[in-house]
Amino acid sequence: MSPPMSEQDKTKAAPKAGGRGARFGGAMDEAAAALNSSVEFDKRLLRDDVRGSQAHARMLAAVRLISEDDAKQIVAGLDQVAGEFERGERKMDPALEDVHMNVESRLIELIGDPGRRLHTARSRNDQVATDMRLYALSQATVIVAALDKARVALCRRAREHTATLLPGYTHLQRAQAVTLGHHLLAYAEMLGRDRGRFLDAARRAAECPLGSGALAATSLPIDREKTSADLGFTAPTRNSLDAVSDRDFCAELAFACALLGVHLSRLGEELVLWSTTEFGFVRLGEGHCSGSSLMPQKRNPDIAELMRAKPGRLIGDVVALLTVSKGLALAYNKDLQESQEPFYDAIETTHLVLDVLPRLVAGLEFNPERMKEAAGDPALGATDLAEHLVRDGVPFRKAHEIVGKLVRHAEQLGVSLRDVPEHDLPQIAPELHEAALQVLSASRAVAGRAVFGGPAPAQVMREAQRLASELKGLGYEV
Amino acid sequence: MSPPMSEQDKTKAAPKAGGRGARFGGAMDEAAAALNSSVEFDKRLLRDDVRGSQAHARMLAAVRLISEDDAKQIVAGLDQVAGEFERGERKMDPALEDVHMNVESRLIELIGDPGRRLHTARSRNDQVATDMRLYALSQATVIVAALDKARVALCRRAREHTATLLPGYTHLQRAQAVTLGHHLLAYAEMLGRDRGRFLDAARRAAECPLGSGALAATSLPIDREKTSADLGFTAPTRNSLDAVSDRDFCAELAFACALLGVHLSRLGEELVLWSTTEFGFVRLGEGHCSGSSLMPQKRNPDIAELMRAKPGRLIGDVVALLTVSKGLALAYNKDLQESQEPFYDAIETTHLVLDVLPRLVAGLEFNPERMKEAAGDPALGATDLAEHLVRDGVPFRKAHEIVGKLVRHAEQLGVSLRDVPEHDLPQIAPELHEAALQVLSASRAVAGRAVFGGPAPAQVMREAQRLASELKGLGYEV
Amino acid sequence: MSPPMSEQDKTKAAPKAGGRGARFGGAMDEAAAALNSSVEFDKRLLRDDVRGSQAHARMLAAVRLISEDDAKQIVAGLDQVAGEFERGERKMDPALEDVHMNVESRLIELIGDPGRRLHTARSRNDQVATDMRLYALSQATVIVAALDKARVALCRRAREHTATLLPGYTHLQRAQAVTLGHHLLAYAEMLGRDRGRFLDAARRAAECPLGSGALAATSLPIDREKTSADLGFTAPTRNSLDAVSDRDFCAELAFACALLGVHLSRLGEELVLWSTTEFGFVRLGEGHCSGSSLMPQKRNPDIAELMRAKPGRLIGDVVALLTVSKGLALAYNKDLQESQEPFYDAIETTHLVLDVLPRLVAGLEFNPERMKEAAGDPALGATDLAEHLVRDGVPFRKAHEIVGKLVRHAEQLGVSLRDVPEHDLPQIAPELHEAALQVLSASRAVAGRAVFGGPAPAQVMREAQRLASELKGLGYEV
Amino acid sequence: MSPPMSEQDKTKAAPKAGGRGARFGGAMDEAAAALNSSVEFDKRLLRDDVRGSQAHARMLAAVRLISEDDAKQIVAGLDQVAGEFERGERKMDPALEDVHMNVESRLIELIGDPGRRLHTARSRNDQVATDMRLYALSQATVIVAALDKARVALCRRAREHTATLLPGYTHLQRAQAVTLGHHLLAYAEMLGRDRGRFLDAARRAAECPLGSGALAATSLPIDREKTSADLGFTAPTRNSLDAVSDRDFCAELAFACALLGVHLSRLGEELVLWSTTEFGFVRLGEGHCSGSSLMPQKRNPDIAELMRAKPGRLIGDVVALLTVSKGLALAYNKDLQESQEPFYDAIETTHLVLDVLPRLVAGLEFNPERMKEAAGDPALGATDLAEHLVRDGVPFRKAHEIVGKLVRHAEQLGVSLRDVPEHDLPQIAPELHEAALQVLSASRAVAGRAVFGGPAPAQVMREAQRLASELKGLGYEV
């Protein structure tokens, strides 16, 4: 079906901007063109666009819509085009509106008619949908690897600190002593869930829209299975109208980024907090702090603060992506162009933060002395004391009440729980006795909470080992 | 370890509001209490709270922290409490702050000391986290079933209309003819993805926090595997600090609701559009319209409009949920109470819309004549014409240009593409010929686009059958 | 123009639900009705609906579209209707869809034909727009008053603490000593801006849509100036299409709520922080704390945490409101019903938080000793030291560098800035001398920063007096 | 107080990156530096930074903290620095972190010690706050002018079409005839409100933070009134802690952008809709359309679609800005750096859309014939008919019911309202008569709705004239 080479036209005339083709008399209004052009951001898709086009050309040749020689010229030409743009030898031309037209236009300049055959049985609508999914899939892979590196870093520090005591907080009030390893592994849990979300989103994104045309597929005898497999997708998409207008994968990945960002913002907040003179539990490595232009003594945890702040924009990106698709009639609408920037922003912001995370964690200078001292506050054993009374047979609610009275009494005396005079105890409650107060030791208390999921050193060690095994299974050294 | 019955105190004194216990002298400031109280919304958790407590009591007995008899009294008492509240015989007391204290307080009134033992080895922090997950899991199940019912309705209508022609649109401009069945199945695709998102979110939510205590687990010898299995979770959570402060499942489910809502908003927009006098493709069933208080002739597609509008609040709910957890230090903070209302709103809004969807779809009165007429516009065949030229050996970009000239020429003459005089054709391009114009028939064109994912009746029938099989496999009649 | 009384029909037949009128054969589908009904939330508009209708009736009589007697019956009847609903003698009927139909329907039951004349020259579209603006204006007034009460509370505490030292923080690192009064007045500044935003929003909202009809005004000779003035608006709206579809005022007020909420969340965060054992700068009054169900010693700053969390939903409300109106064709669409709940939620959340604020502030138990001690850290004087060197003629950048070296030196010695041995000073920099180190006193340093906007006690006193004067001018006792 | 010139050090050593000064041993971690650097986006502040610094230098000289000659060198040097960067002779160095350090560093290279004196009595915290406000104020001014140009365009088209009939829609159902001029002026109303919001936001932003230092003002005797006035602010800010951490103005302006964006999205939606074959009311000028790469006949309203989509990101920007400041302890935190990009994005997106708006409106090719034909649908007169019956003395609710019956009757007969046989009328209702049906003429009906705010040609002309006068008063030709 492919024409003989002699018929080919080797002239260099490129297609007109934005597919205006022969349809329009004049050029686009300047301000309109500025609004319309996407090349400033969709140039990120260059490599994916080229990969997609190469697979498309190979398929066209396989079904004999173009010649094998055409396909070869296209594949080689596209490599050249990509190289030119990547090496900066050529700039994207905004007048050509987007990366797709820039690539195709340059290809036609280079190889003529075979280039004019590339867009056979394809539209920019299925093309951009394919490019964006290829981009999404490769970015998700990078993020999953970065999450694993962060988990490695957390796992290592957790193993160093399975028995390091610090206060656990609720409502930011010291509540019960826990271990630093346990605290660090809480973040590993969050990142583990995030990992699952990226994998699920990627699995759902792994369908290939190529062949959906502008909205209604094509009358040409293409082989969608082939392009899908060639590009590493699991299957072709099932409905052309849906395929060209579906940006679910952008929203879903951006959401995964935002929730990950929220987790890291919690770590950021804690590092800021723990870096204060008041807490003094940690210092960020010098490589992750900055100073003040006015106050020379400052050691500011800028990186932790930025980690805390980043979810703002990530949540904003999710909002943008969902809002853009809201109420859009089928199938493709130009509105979908607005799905790109928030999506890229979410992905790139996530990279930026994850890149810094492993070394940030590795460089944390903990102050176990300060932590232990804080964890030694006998009030932190109140719950353990109540549970001790339960073991003695006191119903929990009553035990809770008894310890509440003890706390109030100690406060009135201005002493710590452990220093309430022995002879006061029976007046507070007959169930109270000096021996019970022995449980008000942080290390004893923590060691006792060895239930699955608990902070006891032995349990934290087990959990850290399990995580280390998982990560080793993924090829990481832990 | 459980005390002999004779020691039990059968007095009816309930615990004080909000766990203030003996610690505080006075009551909470009135305006503060209004801000603090959650019972107005967390009463939704009543059944889940009772289920969770019953499983907890059975476990406490199994590990001999309470007696078997205590456990029996607790289980029976909780059933009675739930019944009293559900039948409206008892109102939740806002002074008791939340559903948990309302239930426990009433339980103690009813059964005395055994009730005081229920809270052994438990905190409201792990309790509410468990309740919310139980709620999340059951709601997700209901939503998945509702999605399936909606897919059944779409599948049925699609099978009725595999060959009904209508214009496909891009940019809301008529682009190429498609089939109504294909159009309806596009929505089935979206809902299919939504289904997967709810299942993934539910899978991730199916870990049991019970036993995590307030933040640091417990020193008592509980059996977390047992409660987890008893409540239908897949496993206990792995880290107590994370478990009490993790509301990821709320955000993830709310996001799934929002994206589903965006899909339905697209259907809503199309129904509004198609119901206009100008389009005239559909009328909503009378049961889904309303009239005007001022304009008696109106037949307003209110339900479609509300479907279009609902994502607004759903996106807002996602924002609220992500924002609340942003920057929160570990572990539990009261801020997390603010995770409840947006979560319930997302779930309930989703129910409200999904409940109406199957009958709405079933009741749509399509106007195939109007659709067919619109699809008959010969301009819609321009792409098919270009592809015809490609089959004749013209490179696609050239074919595209030729058809563009033809369109411009037809417009200048003020005639349709098919009515351009035969003798004008060679002037436009030598490749053009009368026979080629025969492809400008909607039904021929659509039938020719039978590639996988395309709109041809035969392909739509295949796809609808596949969906029907899937749904039958789930137990639905299609 | 009003008909003779004898023609009046005193039967009690009410209008059908939702203005379905005679147009529809059957009732609305049940699930559709559940989605469609707004009475559960728009019942908040009862009083405003009645006020609006009474003004409308008086106007109709003034232009002789109804009789004076009709108007009197309507006005009295509406008062009765409002009373019945408010006293709970009558429940709103969801089948009547909204508050407007509930009120009108009951009015017709009570007074017959005059009631049937009330809706003359009016539609539910201009009616609900008017009601919502009346609601918006009265709520804005209440919020402004609540803001003023909060400013009174801040001003009082600031005047108590014009000279109380505490560290000022940047990056949560101690930076320079400031005064507590200065710190509290920072919040008064924020609330002052919020106040302006509510007033601006209210001013813009104060135009009356009545008379805009469903979308296209009316052919009847109404007097829009009269209703506008009667209801306290500044003018009638200028364009009927805009007037029935404009919900800007909801979004703008919700935004003002959200930004206010962000300000209060900052205060919430600081109170949580300052309440920690580590900071120890403040205790919330017992009326604003709660305890723990498990840990008897806890004194949790729940109210501060909720203040910190509330912006989550407020930002969500802004998103919902903006998203609902996005891309809506003119004029009224049912989507606008979705503007109500997020709007009410924003307003009511704001009331809830502002109601608690003045007593919360009044009840704060500061610990000036702890604050002063923390502010005494000599490192906090580094900037003052650098500025001292500037006064000696050292260029600022050089002074900054010198003090930086001093800080590093002190850290290496493990001593405070003030305790660096005198003989080390020249080695660090020739410009350094013992006398300069005298400026490292918190109280001297603070007193020296008396520039306008600065923390010096004298300046804080001036600023507090100015605020007190402003508030006294508004009628508050400060 | 300024040192003699001979003491000056003319070496070219610049300050270290990010104010790390002598405090830190090593450089920042690479990934951390990438996260930390802001110069890629804050370079937008170059001109404002230079203006702010020049005013600061003049003030320092006036209060004799530096010499007049220093000030002159600084002012001239800064002009040179700005020029170098603007002309691209020099690139911003990311290692210097931000625009401020890039400028100051280059200044010191150029002029030595006087440059080292510029930062006297100033911090980057008050500096960046000042720069951002200067930027905000100038951008707001540009946006207000752009809004006025858009209003001019709308006003002109409205005056052309004061009497052009088209259907007004509610629920996208034809409701009542209106005039195109009236419809266009609805958008002028929205933009008028937007204008007010930008002015209010700018007024609130017009306070000068310079002199607030890092957080605690300065001990040096600066003159804040002078810099404030010099830079065109209305007053210095009143509280240093607030001033360095306040980004309200960013959020408020971004919100104004978002609401404006929502308004334009409504116009975008209508243009998309009206451009359809089905409506056919308008064609966008060729300069504002684009074609299809696959479907040569397409004339896609891309610009209108992008206008419809843009609020997505603008709402996202508002979310980002509010979320970033949520829960931030006073005073400056690095999180605030995240206030910049969403703010710039909101401003620049708004420029992009507003730039295209006037010519887009001017170029709209309306089709008055199609509009008039659609407006001629007699059903659109139903309300006018009901109001006619009211004039005859029928209570409105009864008139509404009568016309409802008539509509239903006509529908059953399959005829238009005007063609219901005369002898059927009395059966429907005795109040109906042939003469009444004469009001079912669109032009008569519209002319009759001449109330203030109504669509009658005479009223639209009055309103357009009023707007034209307002715009002429602002210096525009209308």
Image: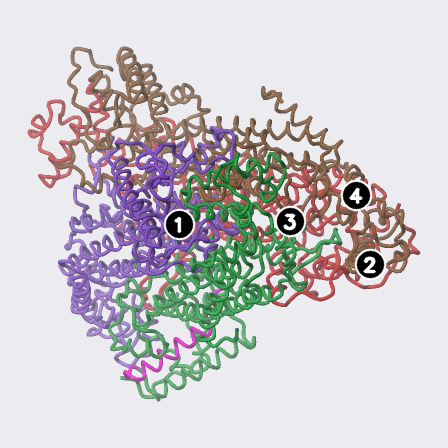
Chain colours: A red, B brown, C purple, D green
Q: Of helix, strand and loop, which one carries label 4?
A: helix
The residue sitting at 20% across, 68% down in the picture is C445
**Residue B102 falls left or right of residue D351:** left
Residue annotated with mark 4: A59
Tell me the distance, in whole angstroms, between the alpha carbons under discs 4 and 2: 19 Å
| In this view, the mark in front (2 or 3) | 3
SS for dot 2: helix
**Residue under mark 4: which chain is it in?**
A
- Residue drawn 54% across and 30% down? B147
Q: Which mark is residue A111?
A: 2
Residue picked out by circle 1? C129
Q: Chain of mark 1?
A: C
Mark 1 to mark 2 CA distance (whole Å): 63 Å
Q: Circle 3 is placed at which residue position? A: B172
Q: What type is the residue that disc 2 sits on?
A: Ile
Magenta run includes residue D57: yes
Which quadrant of the figure has residue B332?
top left
